[in-house]
Image (cartoon, rainbow, N blue to C red):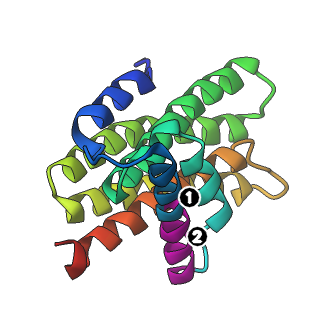
């Protein structure tokens, strides 16, 4: 069984060298600008979709300190990194649920399916991030969409048995939404203004 670990330290180092723009602007102006870009991005994405969570977008992106000193490309990376962290943590949660032996055979089978979907999702998120970093936005979109489909498939497996509830509803929702944030930002970057 593969173990996944996640560290934001390498993520921050990456941002320090490649994403943060070297403008000489006061920190107060940068902070207002970054909050405005987060708010503007989340509002634009929410206006384009009925399933996009504006509140989750704001709270997720604003919770990462580096988001207050980045640009729109950095916000897409933050969303992908948060999705990767969610997927990695969910794998650990699924492992704990499977060892608890409190689930019937149907629910165990669903959890095992979710484990496979999330394990594949971690690899796919890493590939999507790599594609994004090399400017292959359409490839990143396909892979992010595949991860979203995996979260949906995981969630929809449980109610196939009447009365069965998913113990991963929150995790599936967050993974779906975090990928949707990244997808929307990549779409915005693909518009002619950002070419």
Q: Residue at x 35, y 55 (%)?
A: 71
Q: Is residue 62 in view from this perspective?
A: yes
Q: Which residue is mark 2?
A: 52
Horizontal side, residue 44 vs residue 135: left or right: right
Residue 44, numbered circle: none
Q: How many marks?
A: 2
Residue 85 percent coordinates (x, y)? 50, 34
Q: Nearer the viewer, residue 36 or 109?
A: 36
Image marks 2 and 1: residues in contact by CB distance under 8 Å: yes
Tell me the crowding category of disc 2: few under 14, some 14 to 19, or many 20 or more residues within 10 angstroms, Cα based. many
- Measured in 3D between alpha carbons, the distance from the residue under mark 2 to the one under mark 1, in whole angstroms, is 7 Å
Q: Earlier in the sequence, mark 2 or mark 1?
A: 2
Q: Which residue is mark 1?
A: 177
Horizontal side, residue 90 vs residue 85: left or right: right
Q: Residue at x 76, y 21 (%)?
A: 101
* For residue 50, above or below residue 134: below
Give the residues in magenta: 38-49
At mark 2, the secondary structure is loop
Residue 140 percent coordinates (x, y)? 27, 57
Asked if the stretch drawn in magenta spans residue 45, the answer is yes
Q: Residue at x 50, y 82 (%)?
A: 48
User: Which part of the image, by quadrant, shows the C terminus?
Assistant: bottom left
Asked if the stretch drawn in magenta spans residue 69, the answer is no
* For residue 105, above or below residue 72: above
Residue 193 percent coordinates (x, y)? 23, 79
Residue 94 percent coordinates (x, y)? 62, 30
Q: Is residue 149 in view from this perspective?
A: no
At mark 1, the secondary structure is helix
Location of residue 17 (image quadrant): top left
Q: What secondary structure is the magenta-colored segment mainly?
A: helix
């Amino acid at each position: 069984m593969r173990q996944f670990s996640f560290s934001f330290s390498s993520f921050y180092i990456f941002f320090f060298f490649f994403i943060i723009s070297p403008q000489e602007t006061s920190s107060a102006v940068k902070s207002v600008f970054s909050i405005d870009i987060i708010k503007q991005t989340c509002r634009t994405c929410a206006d384009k979709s009925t399933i996009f969570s504006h509140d989750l977008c704001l709270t997720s992106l604003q919770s990462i300190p580096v988001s207050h000193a980045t640009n729109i490309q950095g916000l897409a990376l933050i969303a992908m990194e948060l999705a990767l962290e969610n997927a990695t943590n969910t794998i650990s949660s699924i492992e704990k649920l499977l060892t608890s032996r409190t689930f019937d055979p149907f629910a165990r089978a669903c959890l095992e399916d979710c484990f496979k979907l999330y394990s594949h999702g971690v690899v796919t998120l890493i590939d999507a991030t790599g594609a994004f970093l090399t400017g292959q936005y359409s490839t990143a979109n396909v892979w992010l969409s595949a991860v979203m489909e995996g979260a949906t498939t995981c969630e929809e497996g449980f109610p196939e048995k009447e009365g069965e509830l998913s113990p991963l509803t929150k995790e599936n929702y967050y993974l779906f939404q975090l990928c949707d944030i990244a997808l929307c930002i990549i779409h915005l970057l693909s518009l002619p203004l950002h070419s």
